[in-house]
Image (cartoon, rainbow, N blue to C red):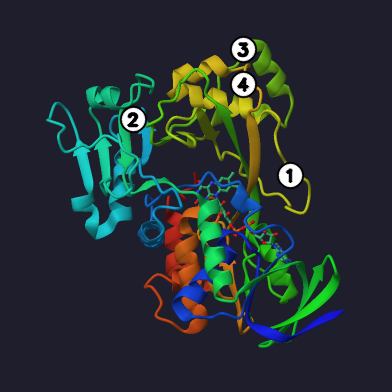
């Protein structure tokens, strides 16, 4: 057994987007240099490598809107400092429905943007002049507008988004939204952490003994080693509960596998300037009678013949002059064990393509003939029931958690890192920090409010 006598101030378990961001803000805000990021895998190679890398400030609750707004502001700071090394773009999110009067969605917008709603929500109705609506012609994040444009005018919708099916009646175009390179963000942060003396230890934390200092046993390729740390951060992604167990604790999270496909759009069906587009309407997939009968017979596939939830998304991927597109649909609601083989579903590419072609009918040309080289992949949404993260102290003194980032960990990594660093160093906390920590479970009012929400903001 090797022994690291020096020890560190902070040991962060997990070098995904979240563990790295915690280390970065400990370095950047508090000058903490004696940090060890511990992971048996390459940094950013588990869930963080599967991210669609989209961001948005659209949420059905103002706390999540404030949290992601803060994170976007921090990403923008990094984009400015680095000459946009993180490839930040801002064409927005287009939320699409066939409902011409989606009062519930507009209500959600008002609730999410709270007191700023009046100035941030612009409704474009009827034959009014549309000069206040700026179409997403440029990807530049610095010149894009804020707020949300609600397009209720069919003519304006057709003109701006000709690839959509003609039955689309309303588009909610959220403007502080787009894409970033999460991998570049992670690399940039790692360089800053290492430049300050932080280090990455390749190994798996197997055991945690003692409290402040903690005594960690780490399995490495060179055999077990030990590390002493004044504080520990559990940033283990899908293994959050396993690491909590090492401290004798449990965390209220589960892991739900979600998938995506990416392929070369050789026929140029999806316009390259399309915002990240989400079809909000549920649907019944179209099958032939024979296909329907076969699917309905098998309990594992019967659900595909029933009415399915909305949330199918599509966006162009990579360079503007490129051809790749990404499709996703987080319809799986069943938790599984991340220690077992990934529950990848061979039928998923066909399912998501059929669903997406309802909104973009030209995608139908790929049904049954997806290009060779289509990439089908997935990862775990590690999540609480309410789909809010866990950031802050664990029950054990000196132990912290930064996790349960579900499908929003790339966009929220910066704010998560900053808030966790503030908790650890006794810095000034943002007003909503407590509600994102484990202490929200001791607050019946907020838990009742969350239980009453119609949407968990999951995409
Ligand atoms: C299909 C998909 C699409 C997504 N799309 C988006 C998107 O568009 N936008 C967005 O913002 N987010 C998106 N997300 C969510 C985002 O990817 C995650 O929230 C984020 O990557 C979580 O990061 P993490 O650091 O918590 O976890 P991970 O990246 O999984 O990192 C956890 C690390 O902990 C390590 N670890 C575990 N146990 C131990 C141990 N005992 N010792 C040492 N190390 C340990 C693991 O090896 C791993 O490297 C998506 C997720 C998926 C699955």
Percent of width and height locating residue 368: 63, 16
Check the picture and name the quadrant holding the N terminus.
bottom right
Q: What is the distance, in whole Å, between disc 2 and disc 3 at their CAs?
A: 27 Å
- Label drawn at residue 331: none
* Residue identified by numbered label 1: 342
- Badge 3 crowding class, 10 Å Cα cut-off, few under 14, some 14 to 19, many 20 or more, is few
- For mark 1, give the secondary structure: loop
Residue at (41%, 49%) from the top-left corner?
Answer: 88
Residue at left 64%, top 72%? 199
Instruction: Judge whether 217 appears above or below 305 on screen.
Output: below
* Foreground residue among 283 and 344: 344
Tell me: is circle 4 under 8 Å from ligand 1.
no
> Does residue 115 lie above or below 249 as drawn?
above
- Residue 99, labelled with which disc? 2
Marks 3/4: CA–CA distance: 19 Å
Q: Which mark is residue 370?
A: 4
Disc sitting over residue 288 in the figure: 3
Q: Earlier in the sequence, mark 1 or mark 4?
A: 1
For residue 248, side relative to residue 26 (left or right): right
Q: Is residue 123 left or right of residue 136?
A: left
Of mark 3 and mark 4, the one earlier in the sequence is: 3
Closest to the camera, between mark 4 and mark 2, is 4
Which dot, 2 or 1, sits closer to the camera?
Answer: 1
Q: Residues within 10 Å of mark 1 (few under 14, many from 20)?
A: some
Please tell me in which quadrant of the rendered image residue 359 appears.
top left
Judging depth in this view, the residue of 125 and 243 nearest the camera is 243
């Amino acid at each position: 057994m090797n022994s690291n006598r020096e020890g560190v101030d902070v040991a962060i378990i997990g070098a995904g987007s979240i563990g790295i961001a915690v280390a970065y803000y400990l370095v950047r805000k508090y000058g903490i240099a004696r940090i060890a990021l511990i992971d048996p895998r390459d940094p950013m190679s588990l869930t963080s490598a599967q991210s669609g890398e989209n961001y948005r400030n659209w949420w059905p609750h103002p706390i999540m809107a404030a949290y992601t707004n803060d994170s976007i502001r921090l990403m923008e700071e990094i984009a400015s400092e680095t000459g946009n090394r993180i490839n930040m773009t801002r064409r927005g999110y287009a939320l699409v429905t066939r409902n011409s009067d989606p009062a519930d969605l507009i209500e959600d917008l008002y609730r999410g943007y709270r007191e700023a709603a009046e100035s941030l929500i612009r409704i474009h109705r009827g034959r009014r002049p549309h000069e206040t609506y700026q179409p997403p012609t440029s990807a530049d994040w610095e010149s894009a507008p804020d707020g949300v444009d609600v397009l209720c005018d069919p003519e304006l919708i057709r003109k701006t988004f000709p690839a959509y099916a003609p039955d689309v009646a309303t588009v909610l175009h959220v403007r502080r939204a787009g894409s970033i390179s999460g991998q570049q963000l992670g690399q940039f942060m790692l360089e800053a952490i290492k430049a300050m003396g932080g280090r990455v230890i390749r190994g798996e934390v197997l055991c945690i003994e003692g409290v402040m200092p903690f005594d960690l046993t780490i399995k490495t390729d060179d055999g077990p080693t030990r590390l002493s740390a004044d504080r520990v951060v559990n940033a283990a992604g899908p293994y959050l509960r396993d690491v909590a167990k090492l401290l004798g604790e449990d965390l209220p999270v589960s892991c739900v596998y979600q998938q995506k496909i990416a392929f070369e759009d050789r026929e140029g069906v999806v316009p390259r300037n399309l915002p990240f587009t989400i079809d909000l309407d549920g649907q019944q997939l179209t099958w032939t009678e024979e296909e329907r009968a076969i699917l309905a017979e098998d309990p594992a596939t019967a659900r595909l013949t029933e009415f399915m939830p909305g949330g199918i998304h599509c966006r162009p991927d990579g360079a503007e002059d490129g051809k790749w597109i990404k499709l996703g649909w987080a319809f799986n609601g069943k938790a599984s064990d991340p220690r077992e083989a990934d529950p990848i579903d061979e039928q998923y590419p066909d399912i998501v393509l059929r669903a997406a072609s309802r909104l973009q009918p030209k995608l139908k040309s790929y049904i049954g003939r997806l290009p060779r080289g289509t990439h089908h992949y997935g990862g775990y949404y590690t999540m609480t029931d309410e789909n809010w993260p866990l950031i802050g102290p664990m029950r054990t003194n000196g132990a912290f958690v930064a996790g349960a980032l579900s499908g929003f960990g790339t966009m929220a990594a910066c704010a998560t890192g900053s808030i966790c660093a503030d908790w650890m160093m006794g810095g000034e906390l943002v007003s909503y920090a407590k509600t994102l920590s484990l202490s929200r479970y001791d607050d019946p009012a907020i838990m009742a409010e969350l239980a009453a929400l119609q949407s968990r903001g999951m995409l």
